[in-house]
Amino acid sequence: MHYRELKRCNNIKVSEIALGCEGFVGKSKEEFAAMLDRAMELGINFIDMYTPNPEFRDNLGAAIAGKRDKIVLQGHLCSVWENGQYLRSRDMQKTKAGFEDQLKRIGIDYLDIGMIHYVDSESDFHAVFDSDIIEYCKQLKKEGRIRSIGISSHNPKVARMAVETGLIDVLMFSVNAAYDMQPPGEDCNELWNLENYKNGLTNMNPERKELYELCEREDVAIDVMKVFGGGDMLNAKLSPFGVAFNEYQCIEYCLTRPAVVSVMAGCHSIEEIEKVVSYDKASREDRDYASVLSRMDKFKFHGNCMYCGHCAPCSVGINVADVNKYLNLSLAQNTVPETVADHYKLLEHHASDCIACGSCQKNCPFGVEVIEKMKKAAEVFGY
């Protein structure tokens, strides 16, 4: 298992493969413990807890007893249990009661990440950030009852607004190759509405691309939901693209996006946990999402670096994907941020080392003018 840092959360490290909680709902106490124990044995140390289901919280508390320091917990605020079912609420009394219930049932005194639950519309953004909700989150962070503030969203426009407040440390966002082609919207159901894909689409939506780059610049970590599109991406009949990806390709796609630190897999069994964790041992061919994206007829990714690594090997050893990532981060801001400059400096080889042999361009499945990109990077970074 590989780990990545939550830079605004005291640099704590989380596993690249993490667990969404939906697969644990409805499991017995024994089944729950067995699944979590196996996940932790395999190196998973990060779990999202969006559900306010009391049984889930009780079972989680029993499963992590004595292991609190070995797991990073992402719990949701404004996700409450009412009349035997889940409810998203902006009511302060319900939000506070739901938070206290979460800590009490799990048997903990703090959350690593307090995630403001499901903010997709601009009006809802203001209902959170212009109200007592955000003040409550800030107070919890000050008291150490949450160590960092997060927000979950499916809308890149609203997510950007949240990040730009400077208050958000972690963004939980829906990411996969299909959703990344869709424009922003306030109804997340539109992301998997097949009507929106029937005429084909071209390239990643620029607002999504800009969101990922903004998070990278601001050290806001992204943990991914919907990595498999609710399973649709794995099934050719259900996939918006009409072709199936495998689990490894979906995970690899997400983990090569700027700012992404982890993917939340909604595993329902030990076998499914073992399957997603085996991503670390999967071959390059099995992880190769570009082999699918570049062969589609109606959906075109062209001229933009997808960070897939097909340009390798470079004849002089340049990590072309990383150079392109740092270049894009700088161009998006019309300056070279200090952190980006530092990352670029640490590369073993730089854009100025390019000898314009053209092997990378021949290898690129998306028609990126790599040689011109290297010239531009050398100009922007100075070497």
Image (cartoon, rainbow, N blue to C red):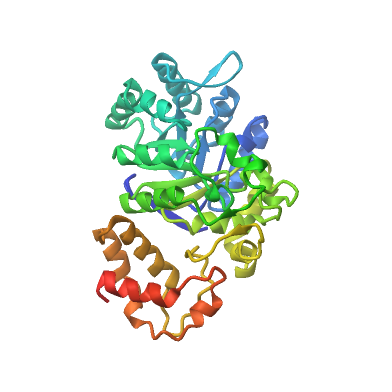
Residue 75 point in image, percent of width and height:
46, 33
Task: Judge whether residue 350 can be spotted in this image.
Answer: no
311 versus 260 height, above or below: below
Instruction: From the viewer's side, name the closer residue of 363 and 145.
Output: 363
Of all residues, the one furthest to the front in this rendering is 199
Q: Position of residue 235 (x, y in %)?
A: 72, 50
Residue 22 located left or right of residue 261: right
Whole-percent x and y of residue 149?
36, 36
Nearer the observer, 161 or 226: 161
Q: Nearer the viewer, residue 259 or 269?
A: 259
Question: Who's the residue at 40% across and 48% down the image?
Answer: 211
Determine the residue positioned at 39% across, 72% down: 373
Can you say whether 41 is above or below 34 in the image?
A: below
**The one of 73 and 283 positioned closer to us in this rendering:** 283
* Image quadrant in which the C terminus is located: bottom left
**Measured from the top left, where is residue 12 in percent x and y?**
37, 48
Image point (66%, 61%), residue name: 296
